[in-house]
Image: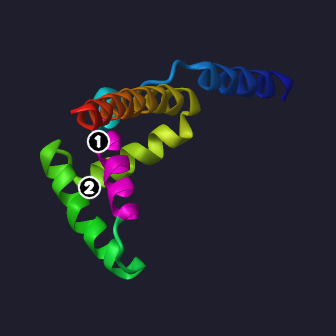
Amino acid sequence: MKRFFLVFLCTIFLLACKESKTPKGLVPSDKMVSVLIDIHLLESKLGMLSITRDSAQVLYKELEKEIFQKHQVEEAVYRRSFTYYMEDIQAMDKIYDAVIDSLSDENSKNKVNNKELEVQ
């Protein structure tokens, strides 16, 4: 009985230590960054509109579909990928670091462009 228990524990330990691999059929992390950038920009634009929350949600769903089409990603695959990355904190941290960097760069460029317009 002890031997069985020892083999069982070793098996569990080896399975737990197995290198995790990203499952097939997910949105690659670099493409996920691009999709998330567009989604956050969409959310920002909708937040600046003077429309009701219900109207914003309907508009969001329609524009979100366009984002998925632009990036050639199915909504179900995006949702499954998002869930997967949320469970892998390190991967999601890397993705959001890239999203934040990109959005910050774009924000800086917009500020420079706005200052140039004010000078003219």
Query: In the rendered image, which quarter contains the C terminus?
Result: top left
Vertical comparison of 2 with 83: above or below: above
Amino acid of disc 1: Val
Amino acid of disc 2: Glu
Query: In the rendered image, which quarter contains the N terminus?
Result: top right
Look at 43% across and 24% down and name the residue there: 21
Q: Nearer the viewer, residue 38 or 81?
A: 38
Tell me where residue 114 appears, x and y as whole percent: 30, 37
Segment tinted magenta in the rendering = 34-48
Label placed on residue 35: 1
Q: Nearer the viewer, residue 108 or 116?
A: 116
- The 10 Å Cα crowd at callout 2, few under 14, some 14 to 19, many 20 or more, is some
Look at 31% across and 38% down and name the residue there: 26
Vertical comparison of 108 with 80: above or below: above
* Label 1 SS: helix
Q: Quadrant of residue 11?
A: top right
Label placed on residue 75: 2
Q: How is the image coloured?
A: rainbow
- Side (left or right) of 68 relative to 44: left
Residue 46 belongs to the span the image colors magenta: yes
Viewer can see residue 24: no
Q: Nearer the viewer, mark 2 or mark 1?
A: 1
Q: Quadrant of residue 72?
A: top left
Tell me where residue 90 appears, x and y as whole percent: 56, 26
Look at 55% across and 40% down and name the residue there: 87
Q: Earlier in the sequence, mark 2 or mark 1?
A: 1
Vertical comparison of 74 with 5: above or below: below
- Side (left or right) of 107 relative to 69: right
